[in-house]
Image (cartoon, rainbow, N blue to C red):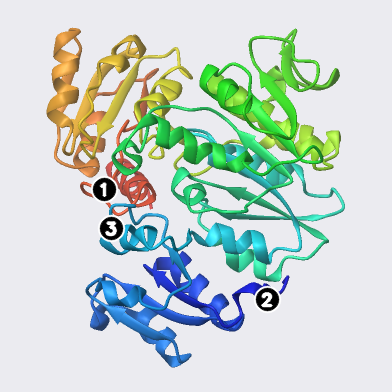
Amino acid sequence: MRRVDELKGKSVLVLGLAKSGFAAAKILHELGARILVNDNKAYNQNPEAKALEQLGIEVVCGEHPLHLLDGMDLMVKNPGIPYGNILVQEALSRQLPVWTEIELAYRLSEADIVAVTGSNGKTTTTTLIKEMLENSGRTPLIAGNIGTVASEVAKSATTNDIMVLELSSFQLMGTEAFKPNIAVWLNIFDAHLDYHGSREEYIGAKAKIGAHLNESDALVYNADDEIVVAAASQLNGNKIPFSVKQKVKKGAYVEAGMICFQEETIIDLSEVVLPGAHNVENMLAAVAAAKLAGAKSEQIRLVLKGFKGVKHRLQFVRDWDGIQIYNDSKATNILATKAALSAFSKPIILIAGGLDRGNEFDELSQSLTHVKVLVTYGETKEKLSNLAKKIGLKTIQAERVEDATKVALSESQPGDVVLLSPACASWDQYKSFEERGEAFLTSVSEFLQID
């Protein structure tokens, strides 16, 4: 761990616990900062708060009094806490730096960093890069939005390691000097506008992945996404494009059915097992980043021949008497569901629904060509059902994913695909897309009477 002497003796308010806040508070305490933690959860329901108190860290639970900011030099907030929070607003008005623990991870890490962002495909691409970097001479360590707290991983990372971080816009917005050695920007789609307030703010948050790059760093970017191209043009770094539409000699591309990087043929697409046209973009981005980070082509080929996807991300569940079942609970926006639908030419029973963020679903209609039944649930079930009725598509409403799964399987026939791809966030009924996906998997097993 690189010692961050600038934090020694500083007064830091850690806002929000969960995994990232809990880890940040412990690390900052170890670095010699004076820590005060504030969490909305009541003390008697807050084991993390009690654990921090055992370390001598003061914790205030259940409310956000403004006086907690008195004398503070810095705020480190949980990325999920919006900037409209009263304490965050007050900290900004006092011109205090507001970090997420990603900034802390960057300052701690002795290892080089590969960072991946985008509206969709982050987890698949991050996982691919990590696996491609196995046997490269350095140990890849995966962390960030993928589920492992980055600062905890950074704390023990050495120059013999390389950190591969999946980063959300929430995490990136709270960075100040963060600078990866290789930044990967996959795409942009209107998402999380309820958090960021505008599309411009959302793009600006994503762009922070490359805000401090210099010519010795690389920016791997999607040359087929006009918004990403425009934003990347304003950033520094060695620009490395990837494209499924054109031969970009400096980057990664598809030519004659082959994945190539800088005119080296890597693998024939027919040997790749990961389904979906959108995953070709993810593979190209991963190949470019991995090659730049020192991955061997043989290892890249080995990964691409065996990689079947990540749980809850167009995950193949099983074949049930000729019916293929897929779990794409991570599809929390329309673009992700459109990408999932494009992966199949067979008839689809689609399960969709979830949190209502105020948007309509008309732009999904053109992607429903192969859908024969739309099963809807959650807050958006009426909106999605109305879309189906408008285009003459059979629709059935359910309450939750568990009910919708049983309906979808009952409606399916051999040759069909049963696909959970919600096009919405999960928070109306589930704590996370993972919990929603697990509910789907459990319901499949119960319906098929599988142990």
Residue 85 numbered mark, or none: 3
Which marked residue is nearer to the observer: mark 1 or mark 2? 2
- As helix, strand or loop, the secondary structure at mark 2 comes to helix
Per the image, the residue denoted by label 2 is 5
The residue sitting at 39% across, 67% down in the picture is 18
Q: CA distance from mark 1 to mark 2?
A: 39 Å
Q: Disc 2 and disc 3: Cα gap in Å?
A: 29 Å
Q: Position of residue 275 (x, y in %)?
A: 55, 25
User: Looking at the image, is mark 3 or mark 1 nearer the viewer?
Assistant: 3
Amino acid type of disc 3? Asn
Which amino acid type is shown beneath numbered disc 2? Asp
The answer to whether any part of residue 260 appears in the image is: yes
Residue lying at 19% horizontally and 24% vertically, measured from the top left: 384
Using the numbered discs, state the Cα–Cα distance from disc 3 to disc 1 in whole angstroms: 19 Å
Amino acid type at image mark 1 = Trp
Q: Is residue 141 left or right of residue 430?
A: right
Tag 1 residue: 427
At a point 12% along the width and 27% down the height, the residue shown is: 382
